[in-house]
Image (cartoon, rainbow, N blue to C red):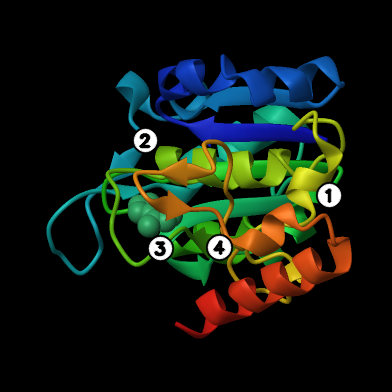
Amino acid sequence: MKIDVVTLFPGWFEWFTQQRHVQNAQVLGHELDFVDLRASTPLNAGQVDDTPYGGGAGMVMRVDVVEAALRERYGTAPPPHRTIALSPGGRRFDDALATELAAEPALTLLCGRYEGFDERVHEHLATDVVSIGPYVLSGGELAAMVVMDAVMRKLPGVLGHEDSALEESFSEALEGAPEYPHYTRPFDWRGHTVPDVLLSGDHARIREWRLERSRERGRS
Ligand code: ADE
């Protein structure tokens, strides 16, 4: 999979790309790249935003600037693949969308700043507008990292532990519910012991117990 992130702040991603699972993904042949929006702006003095029509506070990121960055990168705008604009007003990101995106051969993530993108970016340059939650971040960069993290850990081999991405919170294997509780040693910690069933060696019973705990958490 190829993921490009279009951003005014490529430096924000330096820490992210040094993390183990992100490096694993790259070793496996997945590609991550960062496109600096300011580098290709057709406007003078690196301008990328402008005042909003109709008045109001803040600045809006210009559609022609985003278009120029995409044309320089892909020779065409919109790009020839799934393109996600990160915005607090978008479709809520969840595990099902992460699974869907993990099956794409290529993704472009557009990170907004200031008051966000001119609406025509959402309408004509992106295929999806995605929000990671009902709060406003200072830009789409952290949201892009959240999306990439959730997507990349679904790529085969990235976690190094094939089963862990399958049966985890909100996955189909757990009927969309949160994950069951986990325990490890010590068996007895300050009088709080591990549920007996987990020591029974009876895998069918353990599986049933885990599914039931997961469903219970999903109801609360
Ligand atoms: N940009 C600013 N806030 C955001 C959010 N909650 N989700 C996605 N992109 C954003």
Q: Is 204 left or right of 113, judged from the image as shown?
A: right
- Residue 200: name its quadrant: bottom right
In the foreground, 131 or 68 = 131
Between the C-alphas of marks 3 and 2, the distance is 26 Å
In the foreground, 156 or 60 = 156
Q: Can you say which quadrant of the picture contains the N terminus?
A: top right
Name the disc covering residue 104, or none. Answer: 1
In front: label 3 or label 2 = 3
Whichever of labels 3 and 4 marks the residue nearer the N terminus, that label is 4
Q: Position of residue 76 (x, y in %)?
A: 75, 41
In front: label 4 or label 1 = 4
Marks 3,4: beta carbons within 8 A: yes
- The amino acid beneath tag 2 is Val
Query: Where in the image, quadrant-wise, is ligand 1 located?
Result: bottom left
Between the C-alphas of marks 3 and 4, the distance is 7 Å
Whichever of labels 3 and 1 marks the residue nearer the N terminus, that label is 1
In the foreground, 214 or 204 = 204
Marks 4,1: beta carbons within 8 A: no
Between the C-alphas of marks 3 and 1, the distance is 23 Å
Q: Is mark 3 within 8 Å of ligand 1?
A: yes
Residue underneath mark 2: 48
Between the C-alphas of marks 2 and 1, the distance is 29 Å
Q: Position of residue 89 (x, y in %)?
A: 40, 68
In front: label 2 or label 4 = 4
- The amino acid beneath tag 1 is Glu
Residue underneath mark 3: 133
Residue underneath mark 4: 93
In front: label 2 or label 1 = 1
- The amino acid beneath tag 3 is Gly
Marks 3,2: beta carbons within 8 A: no
Q: Position of residue 190 (x, y in %)?
A: 34, 44
In front: label 3 or label 1 = 3
